[in-house]
Image (cartoon, rainbow, N blue to C red):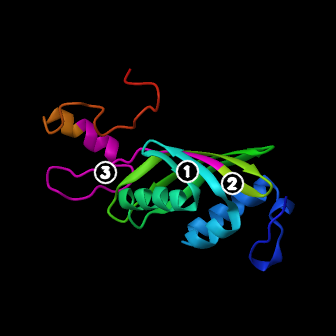
Amino acid sequence: MTSSLPGGVQAAARSPEAVLRDHLDRRRGGDLEGDLAANYAEQVAVLCKDGVFHGKDGVRRAASILESRLPGATYSYDLVQAEGEVAMLNWSAKAEGGARTYEGADSFVIRDGLIVAQTIHYSVRSAARPPGGELLEDGQEEVFSRTAVEHGVVADPLALGPVESGLGRP
């Protein structure tokens, strides 16, 4: 089964790697609608901690939730790999207000040149603010976390530290 994409490219002619790269390029460029038209199946299923979303409207909803949590974010794609029809992406993001995620992970099932299923996982950490209220620069969060505990600003030493996904606290 093939379908025509913008520019006359046939969806089935594209490898999963090509679909994933196009998806990432379009998202980084802010082209959600172009991404949906070129890379997503009509009946795509998206699974994330906020629920299960169906179809392209479901992708729009998941994207809207992410944007609300990381407004104006810039994204880094830390690991991109594919094997057969399955692909994986590890990503991180930093929002305009300083909120960030370090552990974004998406998985994809890509068939006939289109994404038919996607899982999305991420945790957002708010911008760390020292007692004076200034935002910290990159690399200062660990120092602030230790100092905040020492001065009783934060009772839980892990409250500002990284979250170990799926492992719980040591």
Q: Nearer the viewer, residue 170 or 10?
A: 10
- The magenta region covers 117-146
- Image location (x, y in percent) of residue 121: 50, 43
- Image location (x, y in percent) of residue 161: 34, 37
Q: Is residue 16 left or right of residue 137?
A: right
Q: Is residue 31 left or right of residue 122?
A: right
Residue topped by disc 2: 115
Mark nearer the viewer, 2 or 3: 2
Query: Does 31 appear in magenta?
Result: no
Query: Which quadrant of the view contains residue 4?
Result: bottom right
Q: Secondary structure at mark 3?
A: loop
Residue topped by disc 1: 91
| Sooner in the amino-acid sequence: mark 2 or mark 3 | 2
Q: Which mark, residue 102? A: none
Q: On the rendered image, what quadrant is the N terminus found in?
A: bottom right
Residue lying furthest top: 170
Q: Is residue 51 above or below residue 69?
A: above
Q: Is residue 155 above or below residue 11?
A: above
Q: Nearer the viewer, residue 20 or 117?
A: 117
Tell me the residue at 33%/49% (across/down). Answer: 140
Residue topped by disc 3: 126
Magenta segment, prevailing SS (helix, strand or loop): loop
Q: Dot 3: few (<14), some (14–19), or many (≥20) neighbours within 10 Å? A: some
Looking at the rendered structure, the kind of residue marked 2 is: Ile
Residue lying furthest bottom: 7
| Sooner in the amino-acid sequence: mark 2 or mark 1 | 1
Mark nearer the viewer, 2 or 1: 2
